[in-house]
Amino acid sequence: MDVINLLPSPPHFFRLFFRLALSLFNSTLHANYRRALVERRSHIEFDIDSETGFFPSRKLPQLPNTFDMWESALAEANGKLCLGDDDREEAIEKRPLGEAWRSSIRAWPVLDTEQLQNDLRLLQRAHFVLAWLVNFYVHSQPPTGNGADIIVPKSLTLPLVAVSRCLGIAPVLTFADTVLWNCEPIDPSQPLSASNIRFINLFSGTEDEENFYVASARAELRGVEMLRIIDDYNNLPTFTDLTTISKVSRDLNRLASIIGEISEIIRSVRPTCDPHVFYFDIRPWFEGSGAKGPNAPKWIYEGIEDSSKLDLSGPSAGQSSVMHALDIFLDIDHKLREKRVPSPSESNKRADRGFMERMRRYMPGRHREYLNFLAVTPKSVRQLAQSIPTLRDPYDNAVLALKRLRDQHMKIACLYVVTMSRQTSARGCPVSAMMAKLEESRASGSEPVRGTGGNELSALLKAGRDATARATLKRN
Protein backbone atom coordinates (compact mmCIF):
# COMPACT_ATOMS: atom_id res chain seq x y z
CA MET A 1 0.00 0.00 0.00
CA ASP A 2 1.30 3.49 -0.86
CA VAL A 3 1.77 5.36 2.42
CA ILE A 4 1.38 8.72 0.67
CA ASN A 5 -2.19 7.97 -0.39
CA LEU A 6 -3.25 7.62 3.27
CA LEU A 7 -2.29 11.21 4.10
CA PRO A 8 -4.19 14.43 3.40
CA SER A 9 -3.11 16.10 0.16
CA PRO A 10 -0.26 18.46 1.07
CA PRO A 11 1.24 21.03 -1.28
CA HIS A 12 3.08 19.57 -4.28
CA PHE A 13 6.51 20.47 -2.88
CA PHE A 14 5.88 18.54 0.32
CA ARG A 15 4.60 15.55 -1.62
CA LEU A 16 7.84 15.49 -3.63
CA PHE A 17 9.89 15.89 -0.46
CA PHE A 18 8.04 13.06 1.24
CA ARG A 19 8.53 10.78 -1.76
CA LEU A 20 12.25 11.56 -1.79
CA ALA A 21 12.56 10.84 1.92
CA LEU A 22 10.67 7.59 1.52
CA SER A 23 12.90 6.61 -1.40
CA LEU A 24 16.03 7.31 0.65
CA PHE A 25 14.59 5.31 3.52
CA ASN A 26 13.89 2.35 1.24
CA SER A 27 17.37 2.65 -0.29
CA THR A 28 18.89 2.54 3.19
CA LEU A 29 16.85 -0.53 4.04
CA HIS A 30 17.95 -2.18 0.80
CA ALA A 31 21.60 -1.33 1.47
CA ASN A 32 21.36 -2.71 4.99
CA TYR A 33 19.72 -5.84 3.60
CA ARG A 34 22.53 -6.31 1.09
CA ARG A 35 25.16 -5.78 3.75
CA ALA A 36 23.47 -8.18 6.16
CA LEU A 37 23.08 -10.81 3.43
CA VAL A 38 26.76 -10.72 2.54
CA GLU A 39 28.14 -10.36 6.05
CA ARG A 40 25.97 -13.13 7.43
CA ARG A 41 28.52 -15.72 6.28
CA SER A 42 32.29 -15.36 6.30
CA HIS A 43 34.73 -17.12 3.98
CA ILE A 44 36.00 -19.11 6.96
CA GLU A 45 32.60 -20.79 7.23
CA PHE A 46 32.96 -21.87 3.60
CA ASP A 47 36.50 -23.21 4.18
CA ILE A 48 37.97 -20.53 1.92
CA ASP A 49 41.35 -19.04 2.86
CA SER A 50 42.06 -15.38 2.15
CA GLU A 51 45.43 -16.22 0.55
CA THR A 52 45.02 -19.73 -0.87
CA GLY A 53 41.32 -19.71 -1.74
CA PHE A 54 39.88 -23.22 -1.96
CA PHE A 55 43.23 -24.80 -1.03
CA PRO A 56 43.82 -25.54 2.66
CA SER A 57 46.39 -23.05 3.93
CA ARG A 58 48.53 -25.95 5.19
CA LYS A 59 49.22 -29.50 4.07
CA LEU A 60 46.61 -31.95 5.36
CA PRO A 61 47.82 -33.82 8.47
CA GLN A 62 48.51 -37.55 8.46
CA LEU A 63 45.71 -39.72 9.78
CA PRO A 64 45.94 -41.11 13.35
CA ASN A 65 47.84 -44.37 13.86
CA THR A 66 44.57 -46.31 13.74
CA PHE A 67 44.56 -45.71 9.98
CA ASP A 68 48.21 -46.54 9.26
CA MET A 69 47.20 -49.36 6.91
CA TRP A 70 45.51 -46.83 4.61
CA GLU A 71 48.45 -44.44 4.59
CA SER A 72 50.98 -47.26 4.09
CA ALA A 73 49.04 -48.80 1.20
CA LEU A 74 48.90 -45.45 -0.58
CA ALA A 75 52.64 -44.95 -0.11
CA GLU A 76 53.24 -48.43 -1.55
CA ALA A 77 51.08 -47.70 -4.60
CA ASN A 78 52.21 -44.12 -5.24
CA GLY A 79 53.78 -44.14 -8.71
CA LYS A 80 54.62 -47.87 -8.46
CA LEU A 81 51.55 -49.73 -9.71
CA CYS A 82 50.87 -50.03 -13.43
CA LEU A 83 47.66 -49.72 -15.38
CA GLY A 84 45.97 -53.08 -15.81
CA ASP A 85 45.79 -52.48 -19.57
CA ASP A 86 49.51 -51.74 -19.83
CA ASP A 87 50.98 -54.55 -21.97
CA ARG A 88 54.61 -53.50 -21.86
CA GLU A 89 57.04 -56.03 -20.46
CA GLU A 90 57.91 -53.81 -17.49
CA ALA A 91 54.25 -53.50 -16.54
CA ILE A 92 53.53 -57.20 -16.95
CA GLU A 93 56.40 -57.98 -14.57
CA LYS A 94 54.75 -55.75 -11.93
CA ARG A 95 51.36 -57.44 -12.10
CA PRO A 96 52.11 -59.92 -9.26
CA LEU A 97 53.01 -56.92 -7.06
CA GLY A 98 49.70 -55.30 -7.95
CA GLU A 99 47.71 -58.44 -7.22
CA ALA A 100 49.40 -58.85 -3.83
CA TRP A 101 48.63 -55.21 -3.03
CA ARG A 102 44.96 -55.60 -3.96
CA SER A 103 44.68 -58.89 -2.03
CA SER A 104 45.91 -57.20 1.13
CA ILE A 105 43.23 -54.51 0.76
CA ARG A 106 40.50 -57.12 0.31
CA ALA A 107 41.65 -58.72 3.57
CA TRP A 108 41.51 -55.49 5.58
CA PRO A 109 38.95 -54.95 8.33
CA VAL A 110 36.48 -52.10 7.92
CA LEU A 111 37.75 -49.23 10.07
CA ASP A 112 35.34 -46.97 11.95
CA THR A 113 35.76 -43.30 10.97
CA GLU A 114 33.76 -41.82 13.85
CA GLN A 115 36.87 -40.41 15.55
CA LEU A 116 37.56 -38.28 12.45
CA GLN A 117 34.15 -36.66 12.23
CA ASN A 118 34.89 -33.56 14.30
CA ASP A 119 38.06 -32.63 12.41
CA LEU A 120 37.56 -31.21 8.92
CA ARG A 121 41.18 -31.66 7.84
CA LEU A 122 41.31 -35.29 8.97
CA LEU A 123 38.07 -36.00 7.11
CA GLN A 124 39.58 -34.44 3.99
CA ARG A 125 42.74 -36.49 4.43
CA ALA A 126 40.69 -39.69 4.83
CA HIS A 127 38.74 -38.94 1.65
CA PHE A 128 41.94 -38.12 -0.19
CA VAL A 129 43.69 -41.36 0.87
CA LEU A 130 40.71 -43.65 0.30
CA ALA A 131 39.77 -42.13 -3.07
CA TRP A 132 43.31 -42.57 -4.38
CA LEU A 133 43.32 -46.16 -3.11
CA VAL A 134 40.05 -46.88 -4.94
CA ASN A 135 41.42 -45.67 -8.28
CA PHE A 136 44.71 -47.50 -7.79
CA TYR A 137 42.71 -50.64 -6.94
CA VAL A 138 40.34 -50.44 -9.92
CA HIS A 139 42.75 -49.36 -12.64
CA SER A 140 45.64 -51.64 -11.73
CA GLN A 141 43.48 -54.73 -12.41
CA PRO A 142 44.19 -56.50 -15.71
CA PRO A 143 41.09 -56.58 -17.93
CA THR A 144 38.94 -59.67 -17.64
CA GLY A 145 37.42 -59.29 -21.10
CA ASN A 146 33.99 -60.46 -19.92
CA GLY A 147 32.48 -56.99 -19.40
CA ALA A 148 31.64 -57.71 -15.77
CA ASP A 149 31.15 -54.87 -13.30
CA ILE A 150 34.07 -54.06 -10.99
CA ILE A 151 33.66 -54.86 -7.30
CA VAL A 152 35.41 -52.38 -4.99
CA PRO A 153 35.96 -54.00 -1.55
CA LYS A 154 34.07 -52.77 1.49
CA SER A 155 37.31 -52.10 3.37
CA LEU A 156 37.57 -49.05 1.08
CA THR A 157 33.96 -48.28 0.20
CA LEU A 158 32.32 -48.21 3.64
CA PRO A 159 34.74 -45.70 5.21
CA LEU A 160 34.93 -43.66 2.00
CA VAL A 161 31.16 -43.28 1.82
CA ALA A 162 31.05 -42.42 5.55
CA VAL A 163 33.60 -39.61 5.34
CA SER A 164 32.09 -38.39 2.05
CA ARG A 165 28.74 -37.92 3.71
CA CYS A 166 30.37 -35.88 6.47
CA LEU A 167 32.11 -33.69 3.89
CA GLY A 168 29.18 -33.46 1.49
CA ILE A 169 31.32 -34.67 -1.41
CA ALA A 170 31.07 -37.54 -3.90
CA PRO A 171 32.65 -40.83 -2.65
CA VAL A 172 35.16 -41.01 -5.48
CA LEU A 173 38.37 -39.34 -6.65
CA THR A 174 37.65 -35.66 -7.34
CA PHE A 175 39.42 -32.47 -8.39
CA ALA A 176 39.86 -31.72 -4.68
CA ASP A 177 41.70 -35.03 -4.16
CA THR A 178 44.02 -34.67 -7.15
CA VAL A 179 44.77 -30.93 -6.81
CA LEU A 180 43.47 -29.10 -3.73
CA TRP A 181 44.36 -31.74 -1.12
CA ASN A 182 47.30 -33.35 -2.93
CA CYS A 183 49.92 -30.63 -2.50
CA GLU A 184 52.34 -29.11 -0.05
CA PRO A 185 54.71 -26.13 -0.10
CA ILE A 186 58.23 -26.86 -1.32
CA ASP A 187 59.50 -24.57 1.44
CA PRO A 188 57.34 -25.28 4.52
CA SER A 189 58.39 -21.97 6.10
CA GLN A 190 56.66 -20.08 3.27
CA PRO A 191 52.96 -20.07 2.36
CA LEU A 192 51.60 -22.14 -0.48
CA SER A 193 51.88 -20.27 -3.77
CA ALA A 194 52.21 -20.83 -7.50
CA SER A 195 56.00 -20.93 -7.13
CA ASN A 196 56.03 -22.84 -3.84
CA ILE A 197 54.03 -25.98 -4.51
CA ARG A 198 54.63 -29.66 -5.20
CA PHE A 199 52.38 -32.68 -5.40
CA ILE A 200 52.43 -35.68 -3.10
CA ASN A 201 50.76 -38.53 -4.97
CA LEU A 202 51.13 -39.48 -8.63
CA PHE A 203 49.48 -42.38 -10.41
CA SER A 204 52.02 -42.64 -13.21
CA GLY A 205 55.09 -41.40 -11.33
CA THR A 206 55.89 -39.09 -14.27
CA GLU A 207 56.95 -35.45 -14.20
CA ASP A 208 54.25 -34.82 -16.80
CA GLU A 209 51.57 -35.78 -14.28
CA GLU A 210 52.95 -33.46 -11.62
CA ASN A 211 53.24 -30.65 -14.18
CA PHE A 212 49.60 -31.20 -15.12
CA TYR A 213 48.57 -30.77 -11.47
CA VAL A 214 50.84 -27.73 -11.09
CA ALA A 215 49.14 -25.97 -14.01
CA SER A 216 45.73 -26.69 -12.47
CA ALA A 217 46.92 -25.38 -9.11
CA ARG A 218 48.38 -22.21 -10.61
CA ALA A 219 45.04 -21.46 -12.28
CA GLU A 220 43.19 -22.02 -8.99
CA LEU A 221 45.58 -19.81 -7.04
CA ARG A 222 45.37 -17.06 -9.64
CA GLY A 223 41.63 -17.24 -9.16
CA VAL A 224 41.91 -16.11 -5.54
CA GLU A 225 41.94 -12.48 -6.71
CA MET A 226 38.75 -13.17 -8.66
CA LEU A 227 37.12 -14.26 -5.41
CA ARG A 228 38.16 -10.95 -3.83
CA ILE A 229 36.60 -9.00 -6.71
CA ILE A 230 33.38 -10.99 -6.38
CA ASP A 231 33.40 -10.44 -2.61
CA ASP A 232 33.94 -6.69 -3.05
CA TYR A 233 30.99 -6.49 -5.42
CA ASN A 234 28.71 -8.35 -3.03
CA ASN A 235 29.68 -5.99 -0.21
CA LEU A 236 28.82 -2.80 -2.10
CA PRO A 237 26.13 -0.95 -0.11
CA THR A 238 24.64 0.70 -3.21
CA PHE A 239 25.06 0.87 -6.98
CA THR A 240 23.84 4.41 -7.55
CA ASP A 241 26.86 6.66 -6.99
CA LEU A 242 29.61 7.37 -9.51
CA THR A 243 32.38 6.17 -7.20
CA THR A 244 30.80 2.72 -6.91
CA ILE A 245 30.10 2.48 -10.64
CA SER A 246 33.72 3.44 -11.36
CA LYS A 247 34.96 0.74 -8.98
CA VAL A 248 32.77 -1.93 -10.58
CA SER A 249 34.10 -0.89 -14.01
CA ARG A 250 37.72 -1.15 -12.86
CA ASP A 251 37.09 -4.50 -11.19
CA LEU A 252 35.46 -5.94 -14.31
CA ASN A 253 38.42 -4.88 -16.42
CA ARG A 254 40.76 -6.34 -13.81
CA LEU A 255 38.72 -9.55 -13.88
CA ALA A 256 39.16 -9.76 -17.65
CA SER A 257 42.92 -9.42 -17.19
CA ILE A 258 43.04 -12.21 -14.57
CA ILE A 259 40.98 -14.52 -16.78
CA GLY A 260 43.48 -13.83 -19.58
CA GLU A 261 46.32 -14.83 -17.26
CA ILE A 262 44.53 -18.09 -16.44
CA SER A 263 44.22 -18.76 -20.17
CA GLU A 264 47.98 -18.40 -20.45
CA ILE A 265 48.44 -20.82 -17.55
CA ILE A 266 46.28 -23.36 -19.39
CA ARG A 267 48.34 -22.83 -22.53
CA SER A 268 51.56 -23.31 -20.54
CA VAL A 269 50.79 -26.98 -19.89
CA ARG A 270 51.83 -27.87 -23.45
CA PRO A 271 55.66 -27.76 -23.02
CA THR A 272 55.63 -29.55 -19.65
CA CYS A 273 53.03 -32.31 -20.09
CA ASP A 274 53.35 -34.38 -23.24
CA PRO A 275 49.95 -35.18 -24.81
CA HIS A 276 51.01 -38.76 -25.53
CA VAL A 277 52.07 -39.35 -21.92
CA PHE A 278 48.91 -37.69 -20.64
CA TYR A 279 46.53 -39.73 -22.77
CA PHE A 280 48.16 -43.14 -22.42
CA ASP A 281 49.89 -43.02 -19.02
CA ILE A 282 47.96 -40.51 -16.89
CA ARG A 283 44.39 -40.00 -18.04
CA PRO A 284 43.21 -43.65 -17.69
CA TRP A 285 43.87 -43.46 -13.94
CA PHE A 286 41.30 -40.65 -13.62
CA GLU A 287 38.41 -42.50 -15.21
CA GLY A 288 35.42 -43.15 -12.99
CA SER A 289 32.59 -45.62 -13.17
CA GLY A 290 31.13 -45.91 -16.67
CA ALA A 291 33.72 -43.55 -18.15
CA LYS A 292 33.97 -45.54 -21.38
CA GLY A 293 30.28 -45.16 -22.12
CA PRO A 294 26.83 -46.20 -20.92
CA ASN A 295 27.43 -49.88 -21.69
CA ALA A 296 30.87 -50.08 -20.05
CA PRO A 297 31.43 -51.98 -16.77
CA LYS A 298 30.33 -50.02 -13.69
CA TRP A 299 31.89 -49.88 -10.24
CA ILE A 300 29.99 -51.68 -7.50
CA TYR A 301 30.76 -50.44 -3.99
CA GLU A 302 30.63 -53.54 -1.82
CA GLY A 303 28.49 -53.12 1.27
CA ILE A 304 26.71 -50.02 -0.04
CA GLU A 305 23.06 -50.43 -0.92
CA ASP A 306 22.18 -49.01 -4.34
CA SER A 307 25.78 -48.05 -5.01
CA SER A 308 24.83 -47.56 -8.66
CA LYS A 309 23.12 -44.33 -7.57
CA LEU A 310 26.35 -42.84 -6.19
CA ASP A 311 28.22 -40.07 -8.01
CA LEU A 312 31.28 -41.95 -9.27
CA SER A 313 32.34 -40.13 -12.44
CA GLY A 314 35.79 -39.14 -11.22
CA PRO A 315 37.83 -35.91 -11.32
CA SER A 316 37.23 -33.18 -13.88
CA ALA A 317 38.30 -29.58 -14.43
CA GLY A 318 34.56 -28.91 -14.34
CA GLN A 319 34.78 -29.38 -10.55
CA SER A 320 36.86 -26.22 -10.06
CA SER A 321 34.96 -24.05 -7.58
CA VAL A 322 36.83 -20.95 -8.78
CA MET A 323 35.46 -21.35 -12.31
CA HIS A 324 31.95 -22.02 -11.01
CA ALA A 325 32.14 -18.86 -8.90
CA LEU A 326 33.15 -16.90 -11.99
CA ASP A 327 30.26 -18.36 -14.01
CA ILE A 328 27.78 -17.43 -11.29
CA PHE A 329 29.18 -13.91 -10.97
CA LEU A 330 29.02 -13.26 -14.72
CA ASP A 331 25.62 -15.00 -15.00
CA ILE A 332 26.62 -17.61 -17.59
CA ASP A 333 23.51 -19.59 -18.50
CA HIS A 334 24.77 -23.16 -18.98
CA LYS A 335 21.28 -24.61 -18.61
CA LEU A 336 19.86 -22.44 -21.45
CA ARG A 337 17.09 -21.03 -19.28
CA GLU A 338 17.45 -17.43 -20.50
CA LYS A 339 16.50 -16.09 -23.93
CA ARG A 340 19.80 -14.85 -25.31
CA VAL A 341 21.32 -14.52 -28.77
CA PRO A 342 22.41 -16.24 -30.83
CA SER A 343 19.98 -19.06 -30.20
CA PRO A 344 21.56 -22.31 -29.03
CA SER A 345 22.61 -24.65 -31.83
CA GLU A 346 21.24 -28.17 -32.08
CA SER A 347 24.59 -29.40 -30.73
CA ASN A 348 24.24 -27.04 -27.74
CA LYS A 349 20.76 -28.39 -27.05
CA ARG A 350 21.92 -32.01 -27.22
CA ALA A 351 24.85 -31.42 -24.83
CA ASP A 352 24.58 -32.27 -21.15
CA ARG A 353 22.98 -29.08 -19.78
CA GLY A 354 23.11 -30.40 -16.24
CA PHE A 355 26.87 -31.06 -16.34
CA MET A 356 28.03 -27.98 -14.40
CA GLU A 357 25.35 -28.40 -11.76
CA ARG A 358 26.20 -32.09 -11.39
CA MET A 359 29.91 -31.29 -11.05
CA ARG A 360 29.11 -29.35 -7.88
CA ARG A 361 28.25 -32.63 -6.17
CA TYR A 362 31.94 -33.54 -6.58
CA MET A 363 33.06 -30.45 -4.67
CA PRO A 364 33.58 -30.23 -0.90
CA GLY A 365 30.22 -29.41 0.66
CA ARG A 366 31.34 -26.08 2.10
CA HIS A 367 32.60 -24.91 -1.27
CA ARG A 368 29.27 -25.85 -2.81
CA GLU A 369 27.52 -23.84 -0.07
CA TYR A 370 29.62 -20.85 -1.07
CA LEU A 371 28.46 -21.15 -4.67
CA ASN A 372 24.84 -21.38 -3.51
CA PHE A 373 25.45 -18.25 -1.43
CA LEU A 374 26.77 -16.39 -4.47
CA ALA A 375 23.77 -17.43 -6.53
CA VAL A 376 21.36 -15.43 -4.32
CA THR A 377 23.12 -12.09 -4.82
CA PRO A 378 20.33 -9.44 -4.86
CA LYS A 379 21.53 -7.88 -8.14
CA SER A 380 23.85 -9.66 -10.55
CA VAL A 381 26.64 -7.74 -12.22
CA ARG A 382 25.08 -8.55 -15.60
CA GLN A 383 21.81 -6.92 -14.55
CA LEU A 384 23.74 -3.91 -13.31
CA ALA A 385 25.65 -3.61 -16.59
CA GLN A 386 22.38 -3.83 -18.50
CA SER A 387 21.01 -0.86 -16.55
CA ILE A 388 24.20 1.27 -16.60
CA PRO A 389 25.61 1.79 -20.13
CA THR A 390 29.14 2.65 -18.96
CA LEU A 391 29.45 -0.87 -17.46
CA ARG A 392 28.47 -2.76 -20.60
CA ASP A 393 31.90 -2.76 -22.25
CA PRO A 394 33.77 -3.76 -19.04
CA TYR A 395 31.24 -6.56 -18.45
CA ASP A 396 31.52 -7.80 -22.04
CA ASN A 397 35.33 -7.65 -21.79
CA ALA A 398 35.21 -10.05 -18.84
CA VAL A 399 32.75 -12.38 -20.57
CA LEU A 400 34.77 -12.43 -23.79
CA ALA A 401 37.94 -13.16 -21.81
CA LEU A 402 36.14 -16.16 -20.30
CA LYS A 403 35.00 -17.20 -23.76
CA ARG A 404 38.64 -17.07 -24.98
CA LEU A 405 39.66 -19.16 -21.96
CA ARG A 406 37.12 -21.79 -22.97
CA ASP A 407 38.39 -21.62 -26.55
CA GLN A 408 41.86 -22.34 -25.18
CA HIS A 409 40.53 -25.22 -23.09
CA MET A 410 38.93 -26.70 -26.21
CA LYS A 411 42.24 -26.54 -28.07
CA ILE A 412 44.04 -28.31 -25.23
CA ALA A 413 41.31 -30.95 -24.98
CA CYS A 414 41.46 -31.51 -28.73
CA LEU A 415 45.22 -32.00 -28.61
CA TYR A 416 45.39 -34.06 -25.42
CA VAL A 417 42.29 -36.22 -25.84
CA VAL A 418 40.58 -36.10 -29.24
CA THR A 419 43.77 -36.21 -31.34
CA MET A 420 45.41 -38.78 -29.06
CA SER A 421 42.35 -41.04 -29.27
CA ARG A 422 43.16 -41.51 -32.95
CA GLN A 423 46.76 -42.54 -32.38
CA THR A 424 48.58 -45.58 -31.10
CA SER A 425 51.56 -45.54 -28.80
CA ALA A 426 54.96 -45.46 -30.48
CA ARG A 427 56.53 -47.30 -27.58
CA GLY A 428 53.90 -49.92 -26.92
CA CYS A 429 50.46 -48.75 -25.89
CA PRO A 430 49.92 -49.00 -22.12
CA VAL A 431 46.17 -49.08 -22.65
CA SER A 432 45.98 -51.26 -25.73
CA ALA A 433 42.70 -52.89 -24.76
CA MET A 434 41.06 -49.50 -24.36
CA MET A 435 42.43 -48.31 -27.68
CA ALA A 436 41.14 -51.41 -29.44
CA LYS A 437 37.66 -50.60 -28.16
CA LEU A 438 38.02 -47.00 -29.30
CA GLU A 439 39.09 -48.12 -32.77
CA GLU A 440 36.17 -50.51 -33.02
CA SER A 441 33.65 -47.90 -31.89
CA ARG A 442 35.11 -45.25 -34.18
CA ALA A 443 34.92 -47.62 -37.16
CA SER A 444 31.26 -48.27 -36.42
CA GLY A 445 30.59 -44.56 -35.90
CA SER A 446 28.75 -45.32 -32.68
CA GLU A 447 30.93 -43.94 -29.91
CA PRO A 448 32.08 -40.33 -29.39
CA VAL A 449 35.29 -39.33 -27.64
CA ARG A 450 34.46 -39.03 -23.95
CA GLY A 451 35.88 -37.15 -20.98
CA THR A 452 37.10 -39.01 -17.92
CA GLY A 453 33.59 -38.80 -16.47
CA GLY A 454 32.01 -40.40 -19.54
CA ASN A 455 30.63 -37.20 -21.12
CA GLU A 456 30.75 -36.47 -24.84
CA LEU A 457 33.74 -34.18 -24.66
CA SER A 458 33.49 -32.06 -27.81
CA ALA A 459 29.78 -31.27 -27.47
CA LEU A 460 30.20 -30.44 -23.79
CA LEU A 461 33.07 -28.00 -24.29
CA LYS A 462 31.40 -26.28 -27.24
CA ALA A 463 28.19 -25.87 -25.26
CA GLY A 464 30.09 -24.23 -22.39
CA ARG A 465 31.92 -21.90 -24.76
CA ASP A 466 28.74 -20.92 -26.60
CA ALA A 467 26.79 -20.34 -23.37
CA THR A 468 29.55 -17.97 -22.29
CA ALA A 469 29.45 -16.01 -25.56
CA ARG A 470 25.67 -15.61 -25.26
CA ALA A 471 26.08 -13.68 -22.00
CA THR A 472 27.57 -10.65 -23.78
CA LEU A 473 25.27 -7.62 -23.82
CA LYS A 474 26.06 -6.11 -27.21
CA ARG A 475 24.10 -8.81 -29.04
CA ASN A 476 21.29 -9.20 -26.46
Image (cartoon, rainbow, N blue to C red):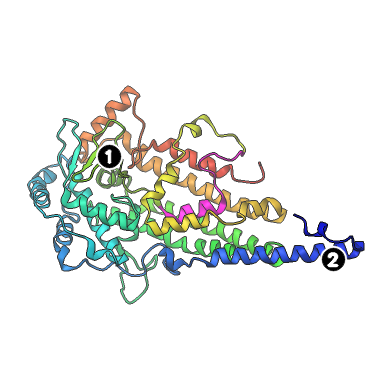
Residue 323 drawn in magenta:
yes
Mark 1 highlights which residue?
A: 308
Residue at the image position 14 percent from the left and 34 percent from the top: 144
Would you say 64 lies left or right of 266 here?
left
Please identify the quarter of the rendering in which residue 291 is found. top left
Badge 2: how crowded within 10 Å, few (<14), some, or many (20+)? few
Which region of the structure is painted magenta?
320-340
Please identify the quarter of the rendering in which residue 354 is found. top left
The kind of residue on which mark 1 rests is Ser
Residue 435 in the image: x percent, y percent? Answer: 25, 34
Residue at the image position 49 percent from the left and 49 percent from the top: 405
The kind of residue on which mark 2 rests is Phe
Q: Please state which of residues 27 and 440 is positioned toward the viewer in this rendering.
A: 27
Task: Tell me if I can see residue 160 in this picture.
Answer: yes
Mark 2 highlights which residue?
A: 17
Residue at the image position 41 percent from the left and 45 percent from the top: 358
Residue 249 in the image: x percent, y percent? Answer: 65, 60
Location of the N terminus (image quadrant): bottom right
Would you say 104 lies left or right of 150 here?
left
Residue 178 in the image: x percent, y percent? Answer: 31, 55
Distance between the Cα atoms at labels 1 and 2?
A: 66 Å
